[in-house]
Image (tube, rainbow, N blue to C red):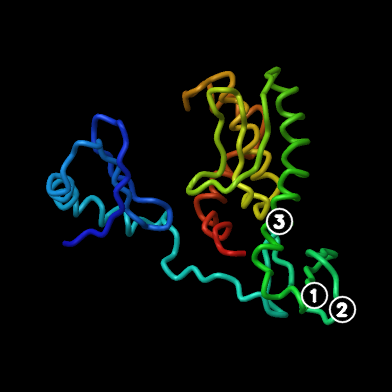
């Protein structure tokens, strides 16, 4: 079979092949490895790659971006809310058990909603970070949201906790799990039994949150 893939060169010593959540194939290769050799290795792994591409946990192939028209639904904190396009002129996004934007801003809806979601993500995540850091007895440096491709969150070597702004679309218990998860890494860097024991004490239904992300995480990637 023929495999389509994207190559990312770096100073690494070995070649790594990964199939991302959107089913794209990324090859991370040493700078001195020839294209012919990369192609040979990738094609030799064709069956494995095909199996990963078609895995049930990968996102559906037919993800479609929102069109931002009245009646469309948008996800926020695990629930879908209707979008209304109104004639009245106003800036930004309004939310009151439904979303509304001005018709004059309809062409910029994608940017407006991203800005709104970014703001709301910080509003929800920062108090959770303070709560769980106090519970765990750990100190983090900075808490930020950003555009993180293929990751929901991470904890950096400098003790910064970073979150994909798209998680604001997930239920609150999923946010709680992700925040507690990253802060637990300040105690135990690896996913050891001790790590999961600590997480389970902080978030009793963490397995439910993990299951939600596995089964419905692709919904967070849809714009919007």
Circle 3 SS class: helix
Mark 3 touches mark 2? (CB < 8 Å): no
Estimate the x, y position of residue 168 in percent, counting from the top left: 68, 51
Circle 2 SS class: loop
Residue carrying label 2 = 88
Q: Which residue sits at x=12%, y=49%?
A: 36
Going from the N terminus, do you reach mark 1 or mark 3 first? 1
Q: Which residue sits at x=72%, y=32%?
A: 129
User: Tag 3: Cα neighbours inside 10 Å, few (<14), some, or many (≥20)?
Assistant: some
Q: Quadrant of the N terminus?
A: bottom left
Seen from the viewer's position, the closer of residues 128 and 141 is: 141
Distance between mark 3 and mark 2 Cα atoms: 20 Å
Is 26 left, or right, of 138 in this rendering? left
Seen from the viewer's position, the closer of residues 77 and 15 is: 15
Name above or below for residue 71 compared with residue 220: below
Res. 146 image quadrant: top right
User: Tag 1: Cα neighbours inside 10 Å, few (<14), some, or many (≥20)?
Assistant: some
Name above or below for residue 152 compared with residue 54: above
Estimate the x, y position of residue 100 in percent, counting from the top left: 79, 71
Estimate the x, y position of residue 163 in percent, counting from the top left: 61, 41
User: Tag 2: Cα neighbours inside 10 Å, few (<14), some, or many (≥20)?
Assistant: few
Residue carrying label 3 = 115
Going from the N terminus, do you reach mark 1 or mark 2 first? 2
Going from the N terminus, do you reach mark 3 or mark 2 first? 2
Seen from the viewer's position, the closer of residues 35 and 152 is: 35
Q: Which mark is residue 102?
A: 1
């Amino acid at each position: 079979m023929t495999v389509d893939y994207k190559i990312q060169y770096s100073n690494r010593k070995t070649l790594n092949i990964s199939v991302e959540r959107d089913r794209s194939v990324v090859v991370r290769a040493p700078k001195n490895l020839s294209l012919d050799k990369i192609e040979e290795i990738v094609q030799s792994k064709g069956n494995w790659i095909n199996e990963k591409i078609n895995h049930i946990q990968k996102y559906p192939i037919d993800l479609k971006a929102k069109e931002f028209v009245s009646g469309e639904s948008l996800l926020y904190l695990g629930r879908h809310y209707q979008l209304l396009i109104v004639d009245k002129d106003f800036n930004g996004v309004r939310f009151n058990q439904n979303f509304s934007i001005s018709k004059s801003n309809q062409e910029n809806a994608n940017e407006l909603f991203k800005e709104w979601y970014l703001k709301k993500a910080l509003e929800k995540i920062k108090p959770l970070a303070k709560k769980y850091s106090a519970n765990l007895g750990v100190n983090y440096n900075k808490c930020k949201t950003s555009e993180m491709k293929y990751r929901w969150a991470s904890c950096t070597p400098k003790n910064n906790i970073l979150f994909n702004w798209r998680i604001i679309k997930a239920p609150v218990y999923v946010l709680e799990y992700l925040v507690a998860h990253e802060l637990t890494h300040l105690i135990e860097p690896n996913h050891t039994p001790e790590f999961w024991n600590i997480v389970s004490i902080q978030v009793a239904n963490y397995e439910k949150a993990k299951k939600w992300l596995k089964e419905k995480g692709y919904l967070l990637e849809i714009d919007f």
